[in-house]
Image: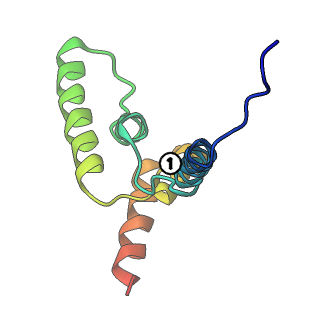
């Protein structure tokens, strides 16, 4: 018959420190939401911004170039989620961008 195993103070301290690390990591992940739009959001915004109903291969290459440029600008400029949300809800990317420009000019 084996004797009951007791936890040493070292093992208890190690378990407590691991549990604390997990809780702190989870809190950090849940509390730190990215404020700037990510690549997928920027790409969707750019497509909405340069939307053109014409379906011509030459124009498509030109439009893709514009989409890429606007996506890059979105990723490197401090656009906010409010701009992206406006575009998604209204479908009027240019009007939302005008509102965004006015809003950032008024920021302190």
Q: Residue furthest bottom?
A: 108
Q: Is residue 97 above or below residue 107?
A: above
Q: Nearer the viewer, residue 45 or 22?
A: 22
Q: Residue furthest right?
A: 1
Q: Residue at x 64, y 46 (%)?
A: 12
The image shows residue 62, relative to residue 104, as above or below, that is above
Image point (59%, 54%), residue name: 27
Name the element at disc 1.
helix
Q: Could you say which quadrant of the image residue 5 lies in?
A: top right
* Quadrant position of the N terminus in the picture: top right
Residue at the spot 28% in from the left edge and 40% down from the top edge: 71
Q: Locate the C terminus and report the quarter of the image it occupies.
A: bottom left
Q: With respect to residue 60, does 107 lie above or below?
A: below
How has the structure been colored for display? rainbow
| 101 with respect to 3 (left or right) | left
Mark 1 surroundings: few (<14), some (14-19) or many (≥20) residues within 10 A: many
Please state the horizontal and vertical placement of residue 54, each as a whole percent of the image. Answer: 34, 22
Q: Nearer the viewer, residue 7 or 92?
A: 7
Circle count = 1
How far from the left and from the top, in percent, is residue 103?
43, 74
Q: Quadrant of residue 22?
A: top right
Mark 1, residue position: 87
For the residue pair 87 and 39, the one nearer the viewer reads as 39
Q: Return the residue nearer the eye: 27 or 79.
A: 27
- Residue 81: give x, y in percent of width and height: 48, 55
Q: In the rendered image, which quarter is residue 24 located in?
A: bottom right
The residue depicted at 50 percent of the width and 56 percent of the height is 32
């Amino acid at each position: 018959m084996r004797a009951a195993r007791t936890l040493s103070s070292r093992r208890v301290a190690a378990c407590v420190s691991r549990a604390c690390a997990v809780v702190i990591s989870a809190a950090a992940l849940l509390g730190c939401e990215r404020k700037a739009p990510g690549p997928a959001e920027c790409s969707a915004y750019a497509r909405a911004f340069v939307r053109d109903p014409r379906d011509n291969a030459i124009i498509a290459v030109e439009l893709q170039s514009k989409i890429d440029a606007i996506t890059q600008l979105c990723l490197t400029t401090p656009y906010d989620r409010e701009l992206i949300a406006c575009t998604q809800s209204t479908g009027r990317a240019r009007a939302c961008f005008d509102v965004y420009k006015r809003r950032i000019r008024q920021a302190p």
